[in-house]
Image (cartoon, grey):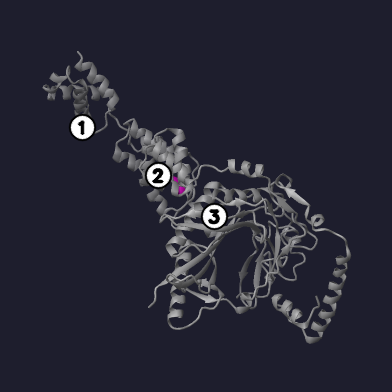
Amino acid sequence: MKDYEIVIGLEIHAEVNTNSKVFCSCKNEFGSAPNTNCCPVCVGLPGALPVLNKKAVEYTIKAGLALGCEINDIAVFERKNYFYPDLSKAYQISQLVKPLCLGGGIELDNGKFARLNRIHLEEDAGKLTHKNQTIGTLVDYNRGGIPLMEIVTEPDISSADEAVEFLTKLRRTLIYSGVANCRMEQGGMRCDVNLSVKEKGSNVLGTRTEMKNLNSFKMVRRAIEYEAKRQIEELESGGKIVQQTRKWDDNKGKSFPMRSKENSNDYRYFPDPDLLTIEIDREDVEEIRKTIPLLAEGRKKIYVEQYGLPEYDAKILTNDKFISDYFENCLKIAHMPKQISNWIMTDVLKLLKDYPTEDLTNIISEKNLMEIISLVEKREITRPNSKALFEIVSTATISRNADKFENEDLTKDESTEEINAKKLAEQNGMLNSFSHEELVTAVENALANFPNARKDYNETPDKVLRFYIGKVMAFSKGLANPQEAEKLLKAELEK
Amino acid sequence: MEITIKEVERLADLSALKFSDDEKQKFIGDFNNILEMVNQLQKAEVSAQNVFNRSHKLSELREDIAKPSFDTELILENAPKQRRNCFNVPLVVE
């Protein structure tokens, strides 16, 4: 068999995070009852006129700036004509000749720079639910008119791994910039894969196929692996690749050509006479650039350089913005980056695996986590007890928020009493009960049991002090407050 | 540009519509009349500059404020068929 190279280009659609739709003031919201966020503009009634949403344009530009794109001086909206019931007007308002953003790209871990071709702004289509021959297809136009940015790459990607890494980084950048939520399970981010294979080293690109609407990274990976194998086998057996659009069937693990009719699209683009050209001033672009917050890499750098966290921990904490946000909210309560990071990296993330959510306060509030950390720091609770307390507090929090998880076996706890870590620790008898009298006894015992050690106190006071503190802590099984013990010991030793 | 039967058939195909030969002939006439009318615009004296010098700045665009939508009944009023608050169309599965 010959050696082949895989050539992949991606088209990513991400819904823009606005309040209203792109050409009308209907709500941009997922999960509403069918056709409740609709008006004459977004159901395409004759005579209704589109009015462009400023934020949708600004956010698309912001995404472009975060991805290193050039922003065009002028942007034009065009009509892309096709007949399908998800589009009420029989055309989609999109951009062809003058998109908002050009170029840019994302650096992959292997050093490759995967280039973007462009980012343009368009409107999302309605949602179709296909029933059967008798009932037919049901159309809900709530999604119709939601602003959608289409991000198109150059054919720079050469494996499923690279594609998934690219998508992960792209998604992270869009989420950190605040321009898109990219909730894949809600269709907030979808991906089309263009793929061809060529003989290794050859400059001639093979014929490509397109796979549409892959809505998870897992699907993207499987679809790429399947399609590359299919094309190579086709060529090896002397066949030819037909340029076509294919539909990925994730259940069967195969892709199928869509009917040829849908391949014979002729979109007949032309400028939409209802919308004026947009003139983009450089001052406006610079204003938008100023609104780009610190992205994952920037936060990671601070975590390592200023907070002294290990590179690996900083990476895990910043991979998902909601985790990083949670970490930073905890920091605001008390600046203990290492302790917070340790708890998140172990106990919190472990629970997140079983109870997926984009809001860690559904598992444990920042306030309660910080309360537990503070109890440990003040030695008011032992380490094993702190872990048990975490378990109690998180279990209570999770059952309180049961409806926010998908787990079927969760029953919701309807009580309204605030979940308070310290209170729960008291109720469960977890707080240390090492009294001052006990501490005095422990100090006396330590000094009496090791009389020789104190002889060196004048020469090496710190060393001797540390030795006795250790003895007191051991005697108290870690329950004593070391600051208190130090005070008492010092007083005794200096007598 | 003159409309031919091929043009009509292509548009019908893209629109997923079927027509009889008589209807297609009628469309040829209709389309040509429309084009002829539009062609009168060629006589108008306009320069490209006049046509394209209208534009919006970012500051002139609509603020992103959501407003109430129409009642679902009103939205579905003209739907030939509806079901479960959706427009109901013939099955279009690929």
Which one is nearer the viewer's eye here, A199 or A16? Answer: A199
Name the N-terminal-most of marks 2 and 3: 3
Image coordinates of residue A77 in percent, x first then y, are: 70, 58
Amino acid tagged 2: Ala
Give the SS element for disc 3: loop
Amino acid tagged 1: Ala
Real-space CA distance between mark 1 and mark 2, rounded to the nearest whole angstrom: 34 Å
The answer to whether marks 2 and 3 sit on the same chain is yes
Quick one: which residue is furthest to the left in this view? A452
What's the residue at 55%, 53% (across, down)? Answer: A104
Q: Which mark is residue A474?
A: 1
Q: Nearer the viewer, mark 1 or mark 2?
A: 2
The crowd level at tag 2 (other Cα within 10 Å; few <14, some 14-19, many 20+) is many
What residue sits right under mark 3 in the picture?
A182
What's the residue at 77%, 62% (across, down)? Answer: A45
Give the magenta range. Answer: A394-399
Name the N-terminal-most of marks 3 and 1: 3
What residue sits right under mark 2 in the picture?
A314
The crowd level at tag 3 (other Cα within 10 Å; few <14, some 14-19, many 20+) is many
Which one is nearer the viewer's eye here, A207 or A342? Answer: A207
Real-space CA distance between mark 2 and mark 3, rounded to the nearest whole angstrom: 23 Å
Residue A206 makes an appearance in the image: yes
